[in-house]
Amino acid sequence: MILVTGGTGYIGSHTVKQLLENGYETVVFDSMELGHPEAVLGGQVFTGDLRDADRINAVFDKYPIDAVVHFAAYASVPDSVANPDKYFTNNIAGGLNLVNAMRAHDVKRIIFSSSAATYGEPLHTPITEDHPQNPTNPYGETKLMFEKILKWYDVAYGIKSVSLRYFNASGADPEGRIGEDHEPEGHLIPLVLQVPLGRRDHVKVFGLDWDTPDGSCVRDYIHVTDLAQAHLLSLKALEGGAQTTAYNLGNGDGQSVKQVIEAAEEVVGKKIKWEPAERRAGDPAKLVASSDKLQKGLGWKPLYAELHTIIEHAWAWHSAHPRGYAK
Ligand code: UFG
C-alpha cells in the first residue's frame, strides 16, 4: 500500500488517481486544511497533521505501507516570506515526523515533492539538476532542506528517495473528474481563466520589462497528469532498486505570461482582459527545466506537452466547476 501525504491537494489527488489506475492501493494522510476530500477518487483516507507525530505513526500502525509519496506541505512563496515559522514547522518538523515514522516502521522508499524554487535565481537555462541550489525564499529553503534530510537518511538508515523538482504544475485531469482549486488562487492559468468565467475583470501581468522576448516572465508549464506519471515511474524505479536521486519535472520549454493569455484566448474563444502591473518580488525572469535526466533516467515522456492542451484541460475543469470543489 502507498501512503500519500497531502493527497487531497492538486498534485496529490491527480497522483492518487494514477496510482489507483495502475493497480496500487493507497491511503491518503491529510490535515484537510487546504485540500479537498472530494478530490480523492478512491482508496483509504486518514485525517491527520504531520506535526502530530502520534497521528502519522498511527497510519503506519494501521496499514501495511510499502512506500510513501510525500506532498503535504505549505506551498505559497509570498506566505513563506511573511510567515517562515509556519513553513519550517510544517514542512521540516512535520516532514521529520514522517521520515522518523518510516524508520520506526521499516519503510524504505519515498518520493518527495520538491520544487524549482530550490534553485533560486537561475545562472543558466535550461536548468539541469546539478545547477547550484540557492533558494530565495523560505518555501524553497524548506524544500532544499528536506532534500538534504533525505540524502542523510539514506546514508544512515538506507531510506531511498526520489526528489521531484516541479516547475509550473498546470492543467487538469483529462477526464475532467478533478482539477485545480486553491483558496486564495495565486497561479497564473486559473487566474487567467477566472476572467472569462466572470470571476474577475482582468488578470495582472507582473512586469513587462523582463529580459525575455516579449518582456513578460517565462515559465515551464507541465501538465499535472504528466507530473503524476513521473511519480509512478519514480516509485517503480525505487521498487526496482534505484538509488536516491533528484529529477526536474518540466517540459523543457518556456512560455511567457503573454503567450499563456493568448493561448487561453484561443481555447476559450474570447478576448481576455489583462493589465500591466509591477514586477512581483522574488520572481525570476525565466525558469525552464532541462528534462533530459527524467526522460533518460525514468523513460518519462509527456503526453500533454502543448500549452494549448494544458489550458484546454484546465478550461474544461474550471468551466464545469467555476467555484472549484465548493458546491
Ligand atoms: N503571474 C502574473 N500574474 C498573476 C499571477 C502570476 O503575471 O496574476 C506571472 C508570475 O509573475 C510568473 C508566472 O505568471 O511569471 C507564473 O506564476 P505562478 O504564480 O503561477 O507560478 P510561479 O512560477 O510563481 O510559481 C511556481 C510554483 C511555486 C514555486 C515556483 C518556483 O507555483 O510553488 O514556481 O519554482 F515555488
Image: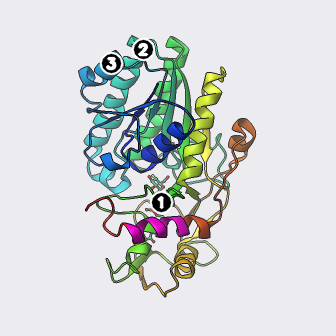
* Residue 148 horizontal side relative to residue 204, left or right: right
Packing grade of label 2 (10 A; few <14, some 14-19, many >=20) is: some
Q: Which residue is mark 1?
A: 176
Q: Nearer the viewer, residue 38 or 226?
A: 38
Point 54% across, 58% down: residue: 174
The x, y position of residue 119, in whole percent, is 54, 47
Q: How many marks?
A: 3
Q: Nearer the viewer, residue 168 or 182?
A: 182
Point 55% across, 77% down: residue: 267
- Amino acid at pointer 1: Gly
Give the SS element for disc 2.
helix
Name the front one of labels 2 and 1: 1
Q: Which residue is mark 3?
A: 62
- Earlier sequence position, callout 3 versus callout 2: 3
- Magenta span: predominant SS is helix
Packing grade of label 3 (10 A; few <14, some 14-19, many >=20) is: few
* Residue 62 horizontal side relative to residue 17, left or right: left
The x, y position of residue 165, in whole percent, is 55, 44
Q: Which label sits on residue 262?
A: none
- Earlier sequence position, callout 3 versus callout 1: 3
The Cα atoms of the two marked residues, 3 and 2, are separated by 16 Å
Q: Can residue 213 be seen in the rendering of this structure?
A: yes
Mark 1 CB in 8 Å range of ligand 1? no
Q: Which residue is mark 2?
A: 103
Point 63% across, 64% down: residue: 254
The x, y position of residue 57, in whole percent, is 31, 19
- Amino acid at pointer 2: Arg
Give the SS element for disc 3.
helix
